[in-house]
């Protein structure tokens, strides 16, 4: 086990390239089960969740080969099992996205249900109802057991625009007899990325990027060569960090279009980067001032399904707000456990009122002081690293495997920006 030891207060300067998007990478790995030909995935982040998913796939006969540091080739032609390792599956919630591809490939599945999550209860009803609508027969005991004698195209309205449910259903529907229409589908950049990967494998998906996806079933899918998009959560994290770290940071190799709405919202914190063709530069030497709503009203930031502000950027935006002059309300609509990490920020000196599990009020700016903390989840963990980087004194962050589930080489990237961060074996 490792911890990070961070000496705060150093200005951060330079350029950083984000890794590929975790939430596109994970379903992309699952999608390889839909083809008997090799699928090459580029800009694959080497993060904890990806490595676990690769181990799961290898366990059911998928050949995995890294051909360079960020390219992995998967060959599922010899996949031989529809019951992936239980203990590994409960480690990554994204294993739920094996449900669709395994049913499509084998007509049956036995899969560990995804466990609870520290950020909140996460229902799988949308996955379930959609699979049943496509002809599946599912039951849940210790494991999810499923049979799919035939995949039949259907017209289905998702009860909420769940990201992983949309991806599961799209993957399954690519192999259906007939056409499937998914209404109220999720449209996050990673959902767009998965649809594009599937189309390059020979699927026929239209409406990509909207909340109404149409999938004309095909009898087989071929191999493909696909590049994962830049992780816009990592981009957002570096922008929030750059805004408070008293230097100037450029985030390069970014899809600027993905950041349009998040940037609109970060503007309420005074975070307004310079926008290049595929880079964003943030000057952290300027004081941050929160923008009020018209009529001198306190503004709010609330999360929601895309294109609303992503829930996964809430934690890092909150750290940004502790350094901006003004008061802001954060309303986390999706996850009831996401705000609890803010007790760490309060201990460090932030002026935050936790109103209820979903809402906090932040008044800034506050000087933060070092603390010893434990990372509760991937996004809160990154937020605590950011807080430690600007705090006075030496902080320790434990449980960093949570951060490394989603952020590749975060300590090395921060070191190149000038941070004093050390990984220490506990
Ligand atoms: N929800 C709502 N309203 C909605 C949609 C969802 O309240 O309109 C609630 C649901 O009750 C659900 C929860 O939010 O239980 C999560 O929603 P969703 O099903 O979309 O989440 P997910 O598919 O399980 C993916 C990401 C999460 C990200 C969410 C939301 C992957 C592998 N995971 O999870 O990523 O927070 O979408 O965007 O794609 C992360 O990367 O740190 C992470 C947790």
Image (cartoon, rainbow, N blue to C red):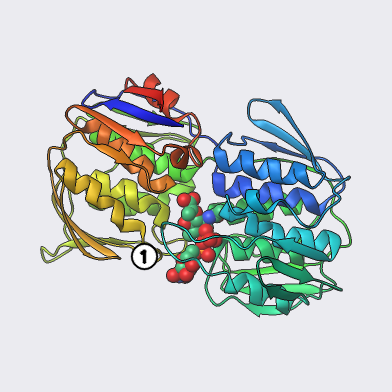
In the figure, 213 relative to 256: above or below? below
Q: Is residue 85 left or right of residue 334?
A: right
Q: Is residue 320 left or right of residue 203?
A: left
Quadrant of residue 164 in the image? bottom right
Q: Is residue 209 left or right of residue 75?
A: left
**Residue 84 placement (x, y as % from top left):** 74, 53
Q: Does residue 10 show up?
A: yes
In the figure, 403 relative to 346: above or below? above
**Residue 383 placement (x, y as % from top left):** 33, 43
Q: Is residue 187 left or right of residue 240?
A: right
* Viewer-nearest residue: 293 or 365: 365
Which residue is located at x 47 percent, y 44 percent?
232
In the figure, 338 relative to 224: above or below? below
Q: Does residue 310 show up?
A: no
| Mark 1 crowd level (few <14, some 14–19, many ≥20, 10 Å Cα) | some
Quadrant of residue 220 in the image? bottom right
Q: SS for tag 1?
A: loop
Which residue is located at x 77 percent, y 75 percent?
136
Which residue is located at x 71 percent, y 34 percent?
72
Quadrant of residue 302 in the image? bottom left
Q: Quadrant of the C terminus?
A: top left
Look at the numbered disc 1 and say if its residue's Cβ is closer than 8 Å to ligand 1: no
Which residue is located at x 42 percent, y 37 percent?
400
**Residue 403 placement (x, y as % from top left):** 44, 40
* Viewer-nearest residue: 214 or 232: 232
Which residue corresponds to mark 1?
Answer: 336
**Residue 414 placement (x, y as % from top left):** 38, 26
Mark count? 1
């Amino acid at each position: 086990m490792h911890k990070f030891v961070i000496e705060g207060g150093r200005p951060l300067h330079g350029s950083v390239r984000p890794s590929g998007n975790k939430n596109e990478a994970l379903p992309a790995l699952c999608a390889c089960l839909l083809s008997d030909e090799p699928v090459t995935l580029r800009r694959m982040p080497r993060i904890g969740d990806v490595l676990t998913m690769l181990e799961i796939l290898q366990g059911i006969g998928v050949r995995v080969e890294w051909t360079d540091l960020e390219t992995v080739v998967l060959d599922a032609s010899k996949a031989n099992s529809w019951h992936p390792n239980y203990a590994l599956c409960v480690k990554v919630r994204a294993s739920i996205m094996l449900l669709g591809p395994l049913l499509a490939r084998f007509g049956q599945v036995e899969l560990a249900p995804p466990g609870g999550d520290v950020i909140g209860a996460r229902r799988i009803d949308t996955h379930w109802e959609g699979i049943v609508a496509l002809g599946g027969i599912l039951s849940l005991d210790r494991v999810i057991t499923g049979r799919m004698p035939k995949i039949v195209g259907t017209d289905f309205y998702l009860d909420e625009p769940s990201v992983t449910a949309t991806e599961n259903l799209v993957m399954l529907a690519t192999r259906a007899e007939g056409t499937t229409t998914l209404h109220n589908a999720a449209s996050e950049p990673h959902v767009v990325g998965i649809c594009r990967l599937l189309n390059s494998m020979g699927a026929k998906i239209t409406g990509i990027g909207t909340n109404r996806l149409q999938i004309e079933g095909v009898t087989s899918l071929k191999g493909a060569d696909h590049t994962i998009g830049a992780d816009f959560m990592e981009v957002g994290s570096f922008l929030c960090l750059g805004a408070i770290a008293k230097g100037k940071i450029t985030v390069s190799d970014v899809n600027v279009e993905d950041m349009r709405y998040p940037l609109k919202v970060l503007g309420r914190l005074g975070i307004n980067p310079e926008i290049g063709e595929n880079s964003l530069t943030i000057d952290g030497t300027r004081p941050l001032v929160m923008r009020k709503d018209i009529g001198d009203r306190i503004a709010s930031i609330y999360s929601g399904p895309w294109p609303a502000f992503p829930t996964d950027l809430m934690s890092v935006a909150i750290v940004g707000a502790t350094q901006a002059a003004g008061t802001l309300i954060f309303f986390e609509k999706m996850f009831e456990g996401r705000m609890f990490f803010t007790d760490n920020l309060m201990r460090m000196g932030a002026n935050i009122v936790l109103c209820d599990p979903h809402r906090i009020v932040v008044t800034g700016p506050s000087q933060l002081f070092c603390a010893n903390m434990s990372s509760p989840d991937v996004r809160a963990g990154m937020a605590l690293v950011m807080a430690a980087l600007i705090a006075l004194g030496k902080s320790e962050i434990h449980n960093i495997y949570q951060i490394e589930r989603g952020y590749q080489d975060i300590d090395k990237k921060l070191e190149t920006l000038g941070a004093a961060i050390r990984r220490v074996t506990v």
